[in-house]
Image: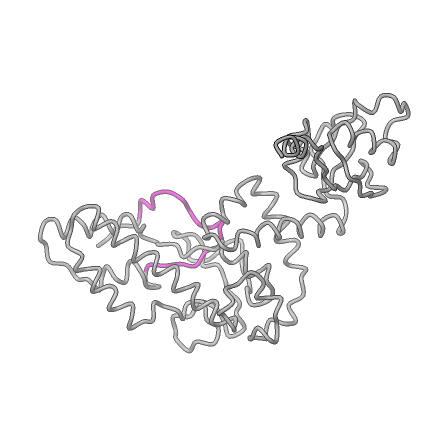
């Protein structure tokens, strides 16, 4: 039995990949057992170099120009990853040359985002941060070309592909976004509770905040296009407009999105932020100081600062200013 286990462990790995040359003149699927095997098969099929005995010198790269330099990295790639075969190392990273290449790249990228749907928005943002400018550019190019003819549909039976990766208990788009808005507001309440608890302060303000939030249904209305509240942040079709940086009256880049259109837009909307004009850390520090000094304070004032549109702006990721908002102070 032990001999069989050892033999099994020693069996060579196999990885299916797609290969193409620098001009993308042909794409072929192959199964390889090593980097050397990949280079040999690539040159046999694509004839990148004329000297067939020199195939070991080929440069293998991903679409962003990353070199595949050894077996360990090769076998860390997903099945059917597209690899570009060069005669020599390119001077610049590989570029996407056609709409088809763009679509293929974005389908893989958006699939990766879909894989992150069980995580929170911060983790999705962290994924995008790697080479973020190019990824965001490609993302918006791709998503902007996707059809929006089903935007008006609401239920999972009408638009099932929109709900890919969602909680199976969610049956309408509006229900999904109500829960999204409530989730963000609940996270602010948890943050406030933890801040007071860590400073050994009375949780009394948290109880008052919670009571107010329950009356407001945790501001589920923010993202629900069918809600009648004036606090709703989108129009009746589900279109959201970025409200601009905390110190601007408008979004100078005219960012907008309709996450009701398709699953890709829904996922991207998770990277938009409800930005506190007066930062949350500043609000909670001031609240802690008031409690510690036994000073009277208006809990509704702090409620509005933490949870209401009076101090919240919906912003595209590029309009979310990370860092102190020095000119914004509690009065």
Residue at 32 percent across and 64 percent down: it is: 308
**Image quadrant of residue 209?**
bottom left
The spot of residue 75 in percent (x, y) is 66, 35
Question: What segment carries the magenta color?
Answer: 311-327
Q: Which quarter shows the N terminus?
A: top right
**Image quadrant of residue 259?**
bottom right
Q: Find the residue positioned furthest to the bottom.
A: 228
Q: Is residue 220 left or right of residue 94?
A: left
Up the image or down, 235 lies above or below 330; here it is: below
Q: Is residue 154 left or right of residue 308?
A: right
The spot of residue 198 in percent (x, y) is 22, 46
Q: Find the residue positioned furthest to the left.
A: 294
Residue at 22 percent across and 47 percent down: it is: 285
Queried whether the magenta region covers residue 196, the answer comes back as no
Q: Which quarter shows the C terminus?
A: bottom left
The spot of residue 117 in percent (x, y) is 52, 55
Up the image or down, 266 lies above or below 69; here it is: below
The spot of residue 190 in percent (x, y) is 30, 55
Q: Nearer the viewer, residue 228 or 326?
A: 228
Q: Is residue 130 left or right of residue 71?
A: left
Q: Is residue 227 left or right of residue 216?
A: right
């Amino acid at each position: 039995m032990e001999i069989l286990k050892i033999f099994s462990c020693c069996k060579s790995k196999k990885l299916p990949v797609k290969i193409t040359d620098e001009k993308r003149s042909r794409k072929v699927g192959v199964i390889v057992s090593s980097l050397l095997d990949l280079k040999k098969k690539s040159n046999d099929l694509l004839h990148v170099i004329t000297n067939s005995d020199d195939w070991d010198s080929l440069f293998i790269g991903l679409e962003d120009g990353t070199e595949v330099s050894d077996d360990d990295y090769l076998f860390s790639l997903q099945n059917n990853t597209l690899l570009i075969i060069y005669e020599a190392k390119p001077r610049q990273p590989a570029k996407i040359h056609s709409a088809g290449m763009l679509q293929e790249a974005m389908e893989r990228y958006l699939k990766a985002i879909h894989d992150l749907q069980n995580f929170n928005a911060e983790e999705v943002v962290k994924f995008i941060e790697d080479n973020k400018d190019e990824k965001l550019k490609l993302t918006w190019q791709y998503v902007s070309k996707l059809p929006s003819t089903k935007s008006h549909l609401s239920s999972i039976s009408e638009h099932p592909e929109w709900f890919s990766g969602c909680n199976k208990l969610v049956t309408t788009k509006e229900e999904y976004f109500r829960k999204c808005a409530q989730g963000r507001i609940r996270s602010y309440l948890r943050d406030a509770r933890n801040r007071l608890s860590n400073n050994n302060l009375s949780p009394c303000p948290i109880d008052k905040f919670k009571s107010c939030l329950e009356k407001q249904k945790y501001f589920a209305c923010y993202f629900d296009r069918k809600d009648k509240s004036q606090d709703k942040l989108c129009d009746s079709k589900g279109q959201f407009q970025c409200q601009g940086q905390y110190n601007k009256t408008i979004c100078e880049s005219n960012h907008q999105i309709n996450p009701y259109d398709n699953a890709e837009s829904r996922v991207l909307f998770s990277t938009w932020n409800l930005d506190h004009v007066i930062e949350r850390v500043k609000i909670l520090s001031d609240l802690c100081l008031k409690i510690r000094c036994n000073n009277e304070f208006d809990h509704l004032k702090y409620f509005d600062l933490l949870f209401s549109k009076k101090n919240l702006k919906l912003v595209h990721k590029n309009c979310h200013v990370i860092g102190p908002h020095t000119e914004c102070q509690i009065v």
